[in-house]
Amino acid sequence: MALIQPVEDGKIPKDTSTTSKSDTSNDLGYDQFLQLLCAEMQYQDPLEPTSNTEYVAQLATFSQMEATLGMQSTIESSNANALVGKYVIIKTTSSTGETTATEGFVDYVQKENGEQKICVNGVLYSLSDVYQVADTEYMEAETLAKTFAAAVAKLPNAAQLTLSDKDDVKNLKTYYDNLNSYQQSKIDTDTLKKYQELLAQMEKLAGKDWYKSTSSSTGTTTDTKTDTDTKTDTTTGTDTTTDTKTDTDKT
């Protein structure tokens, strides 16, 4: 039986088949509250009537409760909207008690059956299912750190390192140097230790400046030709013209 029912002559009618859906709603609104208040006033004990103060108190209490519920709904909507574009981890529990974790970016927010839901990977989830929220900078740092760790894991240990691994170690060093301090801090201790050992071993094998770029061959040919023509005129003075030409070929 619904929580709110029409009152007739102080009694709830047995046949409620004609009651509309809005009348049988469990949500107590102003209309339902005023209906109950009028019924209370109409069928109160005339010998012990309810005072006006009590009616006002009931109305104030109801107004306060409705305002609180409205504020809660606004906060939930704001929290849901703030998650759009954020990376979240969703944890849901099935009827058998099995917990499943889903992660991804929040695409949009949708209100369904009065509840705010977020869409992750094309599936709608309740806000209560959100387990962790991460911003873009954090996820970027985590992704870069995992990529670096995977690259380090592919290389042999420092004791087995050879000059054939020089380019791979050099690329690894370039990758690490391009990370900012926050991104570097996400690299785990074991990976960082192996990376430093690889750098030290490669320095022993290839020399101190092994990571600096050098060209395999350099050829420079410079031809300089200087032509000097001097003409002297005893009447007007002396004019001197000097032409200098330098040709440089690099191969």
Image (tube, grey):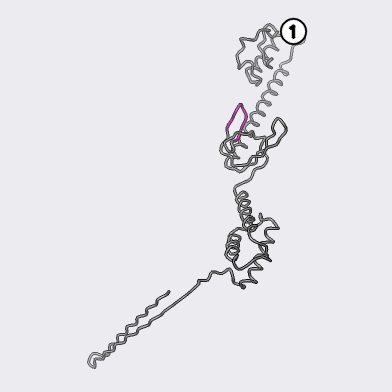
Instruction: Report the residue that reaches farthest toward the top.
Output: 9
| Foreground of the two, 84 or 56 | 84
| Foreground of the two, 230 or 66 | 230
Determine if the magenta segment contains residue 76. no
x then y, percent, for residue 70: 64, 29
x then y, percent, for residue 199: 64, 66
x then y, percent, for residue 108: 56, 37
| Foreground of the two, 97 or 236 | 97
Count how many numbered circles sit on residues in the image. Answer: 1
Q: Residue at x 50, y 72 (%)?
A: 216
x then y, percent, for residue 229: 29, 87
Q: Which quarter of the rendered picture does the C terminus lie within? A: bottom left
The amino acid type of the residue labelled 1 equals: Pro
Quadrant assignment, res 238: bottom left
Determine if the magenta segment contains residue 111. yes
Quadrant assignment, res 183: bottom right
Overall secondary structure of the magenta section:
strand
Instruction: Report the residue that reaches farthest toward the right.
Output: 48
Q: Residue at x 66, y 56 (%)?
A: 187
Quadrant assignment, res 221: bottom left
Q: Residue at x 65, y 11 (%)?
A: 6
Position above or below: 56 against 184: above
Position above or below: 223 against 188: below
Q: What range is drawn magenta here?
A: 110-118
Secondary structure category for the residue under label 1? loop
Position above or below: 60 against 12: below
Q: Which quarter of the rendered picture does the N terminus lie within? A: top right
Position above or below: 212 against 13: below
Residue holding disc 1: 46
Instruction: Report the residue that reaches farthest toward the bottom.
Output: 234
Taking the image as shown, residue 55 lies to the left or right of residue 78, namely right
Sort mark 1 into few (<14), some (14-19) or many (20+) by Cα contacts within 10 Å.
few
